[in-house]
């Protein structure tokens, strides 16, 4: 990794403008995005007054997600996740993971030889990116868990009027969110890995879709996560 990539990664963990640790507030306040100039009500911001909206925060990472998944032939969603998360444009935490999970799942299903709807990848990204950052703590539903429901919705072409498939998508979200309960501070890497693992189980049991699996995944992001729970995490990598 180059020095430029390291600096870029550090700036994404903290404020993307000045590098300060971000504030996770409890009261929304009007913030103007430093990049696009639009105003948002936000709970997460820089103590120096800087703010980057979710759209600007995610733009580079979403391009990487598209690029990797459009060219990959892997039917292993855990493998695809590790490849995408390792790119320097993907921050330690952030709403990018909410689009990443459903996009990876529909791609793995397609690569495994199962039929998927037209433009499934774009639909998954488009819906996933709408889930804001901090959703897990502020609204009580982790975006990666919702991402599994999004994947099921896209694959089954569910709508609010399709009773069976709508229920299945909601069941997938509920199943995943329950499996994500660990009583720990957020970690988007841990949540994404666990969501993919749970989705693979759900797909096989409830949809008769079998995807490749990875065993003994070891995390390499401990130094980038100020709230890392270390060996309490099932993905903790001692090396």
Image (cartoon, helix red, strand yellow):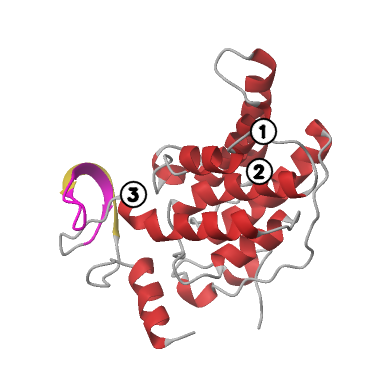
Compute the Cα span from label 3 to label 2.
Answer: 22 Å
Percent coordinates x, y for residue 23 in the rendering: 28, 58
Percent coordinates x, y for residue 46 in the rendering: 23, 61
Mark 2: few/some/many CA within 10 Å (<14, 14-19, 20+): many
Q: Is residue 13 above or below residue 65?
A: below
Which quadrant of the rendered structure holds the C terminus?
Answer: bottom right
Picture mark count: 3
Q: Mark 1 points at which residue?
A: 155
Q: Is residue 222 above or below residue 171?
A: below
Mark 3: few/some/many CA within 10 Å (<14, 14-19, 20+): some
From the viewer's perspective, is 197 left or right of 84? right
Q: Mark 3 points at which residue?
A: 55
Percent coordinates x, y for residue 184 in the rendering: 53, 55
Q: Which residues are the magenta region? A: 32-46
Question: Would residue 181 be seen by someone viewing this image from the given angle?
Answer: no
Question: Would residue 156 be seen by someone viewing this image from the given angle?
Answer: yes
Pick whichever of labels 3 and 1 is earlier in the sequence. 3
Q: Residue 132 carries which label?
A: none
Pick whichever of labels 2 and 1 is earlier in the sequence. 2
Compute the Cα span from label 3 to label 1.
Answer: 25 Å
Q: In this view, does 44 lie above or below 223?
A: above
Mark 1: few/some/many CA within 10 Å (<14, 14-19, 20+): many
Query: At numbered mark 3, what does the secondary structure look like: helix, strand or loop?
Result: helix
Q: Mark 2 points at which residue?
A: 106
Q: Which residue is drawn at 40% across and 87% down?
A: 3
Q: Residue at x 75, y 39 (%)?
A: 202
Q: Which residue is drawn at 51% across and 53% down?
A: 97
- State yes or no: discs 2 and 1 in contact (Cβ < 8 Å): yes
Percent coordinates x, y for residue 177 in the rendering: 60, 40
Query: At numbered mark 2, what does the secondary structure look like: helix, strand or loop?
Result: helix
Please check the rendered image and state whether residue 142 is part of the magenta-colored stretch, yes or no. Answer: no
Q: Is residue 68 above or below residue 176?
A: below
């Amino acid at each position: 990794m180059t020095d430029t990539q390291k600096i870029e990664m550090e700036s994404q963990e903290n404020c993307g403008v000045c590098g300060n640790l971000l504030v996770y507030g409890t009261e929304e306040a009007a913030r103007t995005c430093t990049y696009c100039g639009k105003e948002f009500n936000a709970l997460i911001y820089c103590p120096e007054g800087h703010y980057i909206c979710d759209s600007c925060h995610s733009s580079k990472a979403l391009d990487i997600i598209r690029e990797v998944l459009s060219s990959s032939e892997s039917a292993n969603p855990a493998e695809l996740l590790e490849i995408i998360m390792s790119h320097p444009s993907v921050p330690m935490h952030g709403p990018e993971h909410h689009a990443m999970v459903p996009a990876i799942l529909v791609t793995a299903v397609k690569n495994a030889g199962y039929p998927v709807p037209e433009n499934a990848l774009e639909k998954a990204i488009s819906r996933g990116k709408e889930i804001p950052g901090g959703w897990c703590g502020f609204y009580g539903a982790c975006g990666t868990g919702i991402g599994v429901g999004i994947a099921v919705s896209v694959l089954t072409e569910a709508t609010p009027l399709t009773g069976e498939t709508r229920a299945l998508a909601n069941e997938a979200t509920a199943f995943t969110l329950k499996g994500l309960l660990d009583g720990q501070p957020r970690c988007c890497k841990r949540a994404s890995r666990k969501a993919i693992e749970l989705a693979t189980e759900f797909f096989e049991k409830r949809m008769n879709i079998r995807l490749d699996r990875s065993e003994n995944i070891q995390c390499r992001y401990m130094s980038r996560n100020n709230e890392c729970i270390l060996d309490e995490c099932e993905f903790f990598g001692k090396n």
